[in-house]
Image (cartoon, helix red, strand yellow):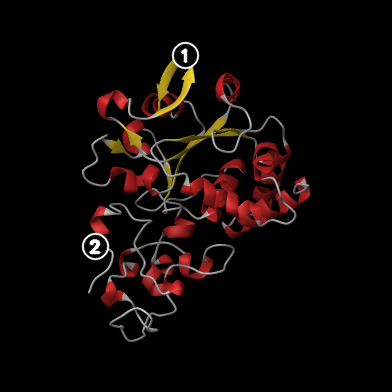
Amino acid sequence: MIISRRQFLTYCTASAALLGLDWSGLKTLEKALAASNGPTVVWLSGTACTGCTVSLANRFAAVDPVTDVGDLLINYINLAYHSTLMGAAGDQAVASLKTATAGKFILAVEGGIPTAFGGNTCTVYYDRGKAVTALSAVQSLASRSLANLAIGTCASFGGMAAAKPNPTGVKSLAAATGKPVINIPGCPTHPDWVVGSIALLLSGQAPALDAYGRPAVFFDGAGHNVHEQCPRNGMTEVASFGQVGCLKGLGCHGPETQADCPSRQWNHNTNWCVGANSVCLGCTEKGFPDAFSPFYKR
């Protein structure tokens, strides 16, 4: 059994409402989601751990009574290509990709893009026996897509994949393509950030972005500073873990990090890093992880 179209429309329009879509925008979104010929989403994976895919699948799996996330994504938001979630493989999968990208499509890229050695350290698929690199694939598709989404910090800024010494020359999606990109960082990214951004795009509205190309509704301003919104803000700094208090002295990067994690939380509003008595690692920021290491201080 899968989620009904009505239930999915309700979920996506609720996400869009949080982003400030007016009634006409919500009706446009509903029409776009219901249309069989609407823009498709093509999801490519470069140098990545697939954590952002797992995060996205985890979000949909909680929408009762979903039991088959692959069917949901393919049939309800028209995710035409995703090497992890789609049932097709080999030539059949590549044929689906070509069909999807012949029309209107949104490109979503998870993972960094290796550029050294001609990009040959990362192959995303084979076309008639020839390896197609992540670099060549994104450079071709990003120039023809309706919008380009960098899913996770690796795609947005290089992230873990581009950490020193970076022998394969991993770059962000924007740097690898030279095209406008909506960055949705996080290690992994929060599924609500992805769904909310796609909902806006399907409604015909481009999300307002902050200085780092991130959707402002999730990342911009003091209202989204992790430290400012942290429930431990104002508490005495603690000297060791296990004590309840501010973790700045132990290496928490909340003051330098923009995201709505304290209010949105993770795993269906169950908890978040600081709530679990760990420091904020700054994973949504440009320069993560190198600029934020070491993660813990004595």
Q: CA distance from mark 1 to mark 2?
A: 44 Å
For label 2, the SS is loop
Q: Amino acid at mark 1?
A: Gly
For label 1, the SS is loop
The local crowd at label 1, few if under 14, some if 14 to 19, many if 20 or more residues have their Cα within 10 Å, is few
Residue 137, above or below 209: above
* Left/right of residue 3 with respect to residue 47 in the rendered view: right
The local crowd at label 2, few if under 14, some if 14 to 19, many if 20 or more residues have their Cα within 10 Å, is few
- Quadrant in the picture for the C terminus: bottom left
Camera-nearest residue between 50 and 182: 50
| Residue 248 place in picture, x, y as percent | 29, 75
Q: Is residue 219 visible?
A: yes
* Left/right of residue 181 with respect to residue 161 in the rendered view: right
Q: Residue furthest top?
A: 128
Which residue is tagged 2? 294
Q: Residue at x 59, y 49 (%)?
A: 57
Q: Please tell me which of labels 1 and 2 falls first in the chain.
A: 1
Q: Amino acid at mark 2?
A: Pro
In which quadrant of the rendered view does residue 226 lie?
bottom left
Q: Residue at x 52, y 45 (%)?
A: 53
| Residue 263 place in picture, x, y as percent | 51, 69
Residue 187, above or below 86: below
Which residue is tagged 1? 129
Q: Residue at x 27, y 68 (%)?
A: 296
Look at the numbered discs 1 and 2 and tell me whether their residues touch, using CB distance below 8 Å: no
Residue 292, above or below 252: above
Q: Residue at x 61, y 21 (%)?
A: 92
